[in-house]
Image (cartoon, rainbow, N blue to C red):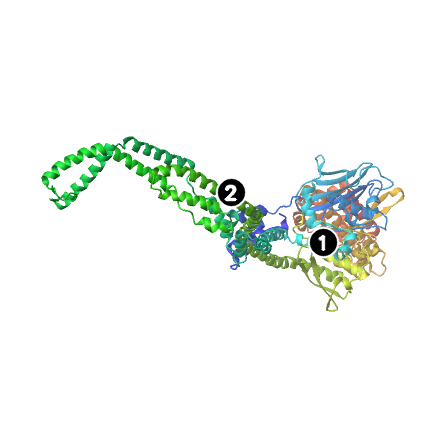
Amino acid sequence: MTVAESGLHGLMLSRVERDRELTPRAAELVIAACRGESALNRVLDGVPAEDEPTAHPQQAVGGGIYLSGVRVRGFRGIGPEVDLPLVSGPGLTVVTGRNGSGKSSFAEAAEFALTGNNTRWTKSLNEVWRQGWRNLHAPDDVSVSITLVRAGTAGATTIRRAWTAGDDFTRGTWTEQRSGQEPAVFDQAKWRSALETYRPFLPYSELGKSLEGKPSELHDAVHSLLGLEAITDAQNRLAEHRKRLADVVAKPYDRRAKVREELAASPDGRAQRAAELLGQDHPDLDALADLALGTDVGGGGTPLLLQVIELPLPSAADLARCLEELDAALSGVTAVATDGAQMCLRTSEVLRVALELHEAKGNKSCPVCGIGVLDQRWFTATRKRAETLAAAAAALHDAGTRLDTATAAARSLCGQVPGLLKEVDGLLHTEAARTAWAAWAQCSTSEDPVKLRTELPVRHAAVLAAVDTLKAAAQEQIDKRDLVWRPMALALFEWHSQAERALADQQVLADVTEAESWIRRTAARLRSERIAPFAKESQRIWQRLRQQSNIDLGTVHLESTGQDNRRVELDVSVDGKPNSALAVMSQGELHAMALALFLPRAVVDESPFRFVVIDDPVQAMDPAKVDGLAQVLADVGLTRQVVVFTHDERLVEAVRRLRLTATVWEVCRGENSVVQVRMCDDPVGRYLSDARAMRTTDDLPEEARAELVASCCRSALETAGDTRFRQVRLARGQSHAEVEQVLEQALTTRQRMSLAVFDDLSENRNLLTHLTNTLGAWAVDVLNACRAGTTSPYDGDLLTLIRDTERLTNWLRDE
């Protein structure tokens, strides 16, 4: 997480908690989406969200980074190795030089050394830019490097790109070296996020394209700066899930008509039933599942055919067991059925009935002969005789009982003709089966066990064969129907599965949609809130740059109506009337507007870079806008290191005329691409130049001239001393705030010189002695003369004072 995203997750959480209209489930999805894809997937899978610590903002490259210098060899317009020294602290540095002097080669080298590319090369359609990167006069060993100083950290870091002969510009070595350490491979990943979000380089090729190029590029640059990438990522995660869930929910309903049409065209009863169910507003998914899986066989005769297949008949084993029992019973009867046994049995039966009659009616005449009397004496004698006869006939009785049981069991196997055979007569040829079954059923009424034994196996075999034939025909019809139904059943099952998923995901889709809509609305509000300070600063800068322009810049806001429609909207008015920026702006105004948008982004507190490098911003600007540009750059230079490359002398002239504090380097290119860098106007030099000008001004009274010359010399001396003190303390690792705090305690020129010479304010008393011993009495005379100018006019030789002041400032710089 970048610093620009600091607190975003906590901010989202607090807004979710305050929004009473957001459902708990949608709120859970919002927080999970902000935490990442895995957290969102867990919540969507039903895993309860866990409290996760929000990552603390970090800058992988540290902060407070300044440029200390650029070194180039054999690159672009520069041949032999040359350095561009820079003061690693806040301030404006202007690097000037005619076109072709090698000036822009320094800017390109600095950008390429740190970022690995150059906007002019990567975006230009002209391959000449890529082909001409090696200098013709030093083509073998090429290198570009920058030295960086980080506030609060001792030492410096040098980042270097180097190529040997034959290397393509995409190859070579790329190293990073801390003071006192060996070079290491440059860690691009560590710097990537900071460079993408807070890129401190604005080349000339980007000035016009910032507004005239792709609208999405400027939008994305500003959007990233606002720290809203995390919320955009969260919104995109929810959008992806919403699209996926919407497809899942819509898919079965999109396909339902087609599936129903295919089913309705089939004569199969199952298909007809399924088509009927699919025609309902809310189809019965359980009923459709039964049809698809075969639990419900539908209509159209299929159920009857399935019943035919399930028709029950006694098995051969069942029949064999019955016949075996019947055979045993018949054999048992045959074995005991003698004439005497049968007579005993019949007589015992007659006597048993008579005895029961006597017990019921008492003494009576014999109902058979009418002569004898059934009295008590008869009853006693007859009972004994009946018992004797019954014992003699018991075996025959038991055999008869067994035969009756076996016969009944055999008859029970022969059920009546099923009504099903008549019902399926239109589907199958059932006549043979019904005839065979009718003959089989007749056995159920047979009174003759012997005849039953003979007919039973014959008729069973006939009915079994007829029914098996009927079942085979029914199965054949079912198979034919299933052959047609099976693909329809598969299609129905697939639709059913999709419908079940859609039903389960409908509420999830509603929750995700609610969460996405909430994030979209919240992101819009956050964009407006976070861009407001940048927009205000852009307006302020534009007011300084617009000098004599009738174009006014109003609100700056981000517009995004989709991935392919992202832009920065500028509310521009001409003479108070709204208009399009591109339609009315000149090239110079476009460059000025681009700077107004770039500078607030480049100097935000969250940026680890405390420097900006701008190449050729002056072109196409009228003189009034150049003045405004100089003032804006000087203002930015109060808190940032601003390095501007230009071939237009108007910027340097404006800096001098407006008496703005700036260091000016001049780049000159001689034969064989030999480039020299010389300071042509730094703050110290400007004060000395002003002193020389004052000395030769005839319109000034002598006392005023002397006072002004001494004042300029004093300013030169203090500026040189402050610069040296800053360099020493910053190189030691102190922050700029700490350095400036010490400088604020130095109230006199002597105290500020003590800081420059001794790096210690308390050494003030030893300053004059040190200067005398080190440089000579003249240095003390210079210091006293500058101090004297504060209370009384200097009465010495002004030219000597100026020369000696220059000697002393040069010593401070070289010390």
Circles 1 and 2 in contact, beta carbons < 8 Å:
no
Which residue in the structure is indicated by mark 1? 217
Q: Whole-Å distance between the Cαs marked 1 and 2?
A: 76 Å
Residue 520 falls in which quadrant of the image? Answer: bottom right
* Residue 460 point in image, percent of width and height: 42, 39
Residue nearer the viewer, 812 or 37: 37
Residue nearer the viewer, 198 or 450: 450
**Is residue 585 found left or right of 243 in the rendered image?**
right
Crowding near pointer 1: few (<14 within 10 Å), some, many (20+)? some
Can residue 11 be seen?
A: no
Q: Give the amino acid type for the residue marked by disc 2 in the picture.
A: Ala
Check disc 2 and report its element: helix, strand or loop.
Answer: helix
Residue 472 image label: 2
In this rendering, is residue 332 above or below 754? Answer: above
Can residue 526 be seen?
A: yes
* Residue 230 point in image, percent of width and height: 62, 51
